[in-house]
Image (cartoon, rainbow, N blue to C red):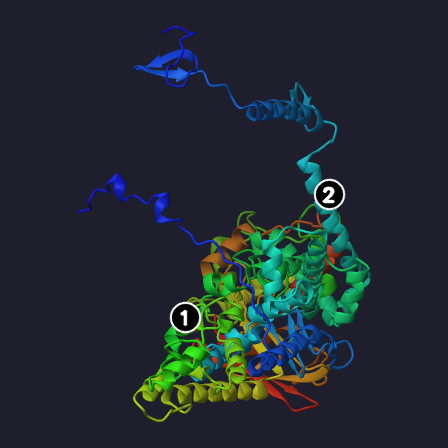
Amino acid sequence: MSDHNEIDRVSGRSTTGHEWDGIKELNTPLPRWWVLTFYATIIWAIGYWVVYPAWPLVSGYTTGLFQYSTRAGVATDLADIEKLRGEKMAVLGNALLSDIEKDPALLALARARGKTVFADNCAPCHGSGGAGAKGYPNLNDDDWLWGGSLDQIMQTIQFGARSGHAKTHEGQMLAFGRDGVLKKDEIVTVANYVRSLSGLSTAPRFDAVAGKKLFTENCASCHGDNAKGNPELGAPNLTDQIWLYGSDEETLVETITNGRAGVMPAWVGRLDPVTVKALAVYVHSLGGGK
Amino acid sequence: MNKPVSPDELITDEDGPLYAPRKKVYPQSVSGRFRSIKWRLMAVCLGVYYLLPFVRWHRGLGAPDQAVLIDFPNRRFYFFFIELWPQEIYYFTGLLVLAALALFLMNALGGRIWCGYLCPQTVWTDLFCAVERLVEGDRRAQMKADAGPMTVKRAGRRALKHAIWLMIAWWTGGAWVLYFADAPTLVRDLATFQAPVIAYVWIAMLTASTYLLAGYMREQVCVYMCPWPRIQAALTDEWALIVTYKYDRGEPRCSVKKAFDIRSLGEKAGDCIDCNQCVAVCPTGIDIRDGAQLGCIQCGLCIDACDAVMTKISRKTGLIGYDNDINVQRRVAGKQEIFKPVRARTVVYASLITVVCAVMLYALMSRTLLDINVLHDRNPIAVRLSDGAIRNGYTLRFLNKRGFDRVIAIDVEGPANAKLHVIGADSVTPDRPMIVLGRDTTTELRVLVTAAFDEKAEKSVPVTFRVTDIGLGEVASATDHFVLP
């Protein structure tokens, strides 16, 4: 450490006393503007603490004079959007469900709203275009477990199926095998009989008479004597070409043995009535609606 | 290997500065043939620019009735009887191609006619110079004033000049924004401070740029900023008529008296008396007698100045004139002057212009005012119905470019016995759905096509949607595919 008060011969300035490998640091004062700017930033920072949220406390934080909050900002923005949307949606809310499809402007509005809501809420099960999957109905075809009219679709969206809501659709495919109602060979026979109803091939030594008898005794109460199904109970039509879980013998045996009870949630509390209405119109316009 | 630079070789102050300071140009007023052509062209150009937004053109109820309007909010461009939609932007490409070809042709015939007579920089600078001369006096008065001290009178004149300049610049910026909204309404809104902020911003920007470019930068724009002088050098040839000092006739320069003496001795004396008038009137401050050069915008004012002098001293006019190098050489060789406007180059340009014009005109006349686009559903791509039939979903988009509502019928051709179902159609007959298309809008429809499933059929067959305007009989169609699952 060299002398603190040493004067540099070239510049005439004192040094700081710091020296590295013979190079000494000049004690050059900071420019006044720089120092003032530095003080100004300190004052600014103190002002910032007062005005904006700054200090974490034990259970909370200082909120500041402005009560600024990004979360509240988002809420305000969302409220603004809702207000803007509300004006348009009010028109939709006032229109009769059956009239919406007759008005091109209302239909376009309902479809646009329905499409985004569908993507957010329905697509995980039914697919982005409503094509469905095994166990999740295709909403583009014309086969509807609980009915495909506008009113019926809206009913299903609102209260769901087996959702636990008081107004939900109820109906069970019983577990005929597991509950010991039918024996294994009887189940195979009924499965083959059901396949024959829609013109599918059957096992070589399949007994059609026994199949029909078993069907009438066990299945007809829900699926109907002609196996056309019953939308009241959500019982599918067994004579058409659309199968929710598949139509091969193995799948049918599985269905008859253990039963089926897919759940569609109720949306009545989660989506507002106008949105449900738009959703019903959108699903109906996918092409499957009756 | 780079040779190390010795300190002696470095650029020092003695080599002069690295840039040339601007020498102020004081163009002198002049009158004559080219000056009057320039006045008239200026009146036409500025007249069109300032007044065009106020020209009305009736297009029917609900449509804007401004003859030329760029309607950004509604994405339409109106030009008298033409209304263009965003997807027809290629007409502007055609227009730009035409403009380029026209420039090429101009250049092949008469050099930089654009620069000298039509370029906005030239037109507004000319106007600003005229104002300057009107307020502060001509070349001599201005030079004298600039050399002398600032007096109250001079300061007042200068302030007046800038006020007039700013007013012209402000009008120029103001006229620009009128092309983007209904002009009379916008003028009223601007005056009452009801106009959108962007209008004021644009007016401010264009006021500033006009004032700076035409008031201060002037010839600097032509010499340092504009790419056109560089490009045109590659486009011109020895046949193009350019402003030329005929040195074969002008040299050697000498006074009238000296020329008389020389000629009486039977020797050759030039017609140029070195009066420098051609330099004094030049708006870019060049000497045309140095030959063709970058700074020359070929406005022809030096021709007017020289002709006036030649007339005064009773010599033949045209010492400076539109001419070319070929003729200079031919005259020296004692041959006839020759002008050839019809050459391979000009013929090619002219025929290209004709072709582009014809193509654009045909495209404009035959463009459809009823259009259809089709988009196939992607998820699901095909649906099997309960009776085994197959159904495909499509979104159809119709464009009605006419200014009135129209009823259209939709037909489908494709797989055998295909049935069309339009969601939300005002069906007149079940087999031929009809809908109303609003005027000057696009309409989107969701349609379903159903056909019996055929195991042996190909996985995909073409399907064509055809729309027919019930009233006018106009037809448009679009083809997509009908797909089996």
Q: Between residue A222 and residue B27, name the one nearer to us.
A: B27
Give the side of residue B277 with respect to residue B203, left or right: left
Residue A12 sits in quarter: top left
Q: In this figure, which residue is indicated by the disc labeled 2? A: A76
Q: What secondary structure is marked by label 1? A: loop
Residue A16: x %, y % from top left: 43, 12
Q: Nearer the viewer, mark 2 or mark 1?
A: 1
Q: In this figure, which residue is indicated by the disc labeled 1? A: B293
Residue B476 sits in quarter: bottom right
Contact between labelled residues 1 and 2, with CB atoms less than 8 Å apart? no
Residue B147: x %, y % from top left: 58, 54
Residue B289: x %, y % from top left: 41, 73
Q: Is residue B235 above or below residue A43?
A: below
> Residue B91: which disc?
none
Q: Is residue B432 above or below residue A84?
A: below
Quadrant of the snapshot with the C terminus of chain A: bottom right
Amino acid at circle 2: Thr
Sort mark 1 into few (<14), some (14-19) or many (20+) by Cα contacts within 10 Å. Answer: few
- Name the residue: 69% across, 61% down: B161
Give the side of residue B439 with respect to residue B27, left or right: right
- Name the residue: 72% across, 55% down: B153
- Name the residue: 61% across, 61% down: B142
